[in-house]
Image (tube, helix red, strand yellow):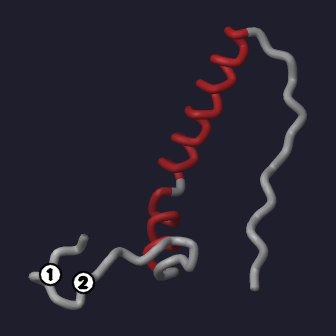
Amino acid sequence: MNEPDRPLWLAKPQLSDEAAAQMLNFLQELLIGFENAFYDQLHRHYANRGPSPRTPRPYEPSDPDADPF
């Protein structure tokens, strides 16, 4: 059985409020740029790998007319 990924722990630097906001903006722009540059590959990877064991399957009632609750 696979163990869950351990959380990444980084030392938290002392940042001013403005520096923290600038860092957040930088990281968001970096992520958006990465996703845009590699969208085709990322989309193909996730489409081909099938459902993840961590992702719960949606509820599928055996009787389509049955109340799901």
Q: Where residue 14 appears, x then y in whole percent?
A: 86, 17
> Local crowd at mark 2 within 10 Å, few (<14), some, or many (≥20)?
few
Is 52 above or below relative to 24? below
Is 64 above or below relative to 32? below
In the orientation shown, which residue stands out farthest toward the left?
A: 65
> Local crowd at mark 1 within 10 Å, few (<14), some, or many (≥20)?
few
In the orientation shown, which residue stands out farthest toward the bottom?
A: 62
Kindly identify which numbered label has been placed on residue 19.
none
**Residue at 57 percent of width and 47 percent of height:** 34
Is 12 above or below relative to 49? above
Q: Where residue 54 appears, x then y in whole percent?
A: 57, 73
Q: Give the side of residue 27 with respect to residue 33, left or right.
A: right
Q: Where residue 42 appears, x then y in whole percent?
A: 51, 64
Is 67 in front, or is 29? Answer: 67
Q: In the rendered structure, which disc, 1 or 2, sits on the residue that comes first in sequence? A: 2
**Residue at 78 percent of width and 74 percent of height:** 3
| Element assignment for label 2 | loop
Q: Amino acid at mark 1?
A: Ala
| Element assignment for label 1 | loop
Quadrant holding the N terminus? bottom right
For marks 1 and 2, give the CA distance: 7 Å
In the orientation shown, which residue stands out farthest toward the right?
A: 11
**Residue at 61 percent of width and 37 percent of height:** 30
Residue under label 1? 66
Quick check: marks 1 and 2 in contact, CB under 8 Å?
yes
Q: Give the side of residue 19 with respect to residue 24, left or right.
A: right
Residue under label 2? 61
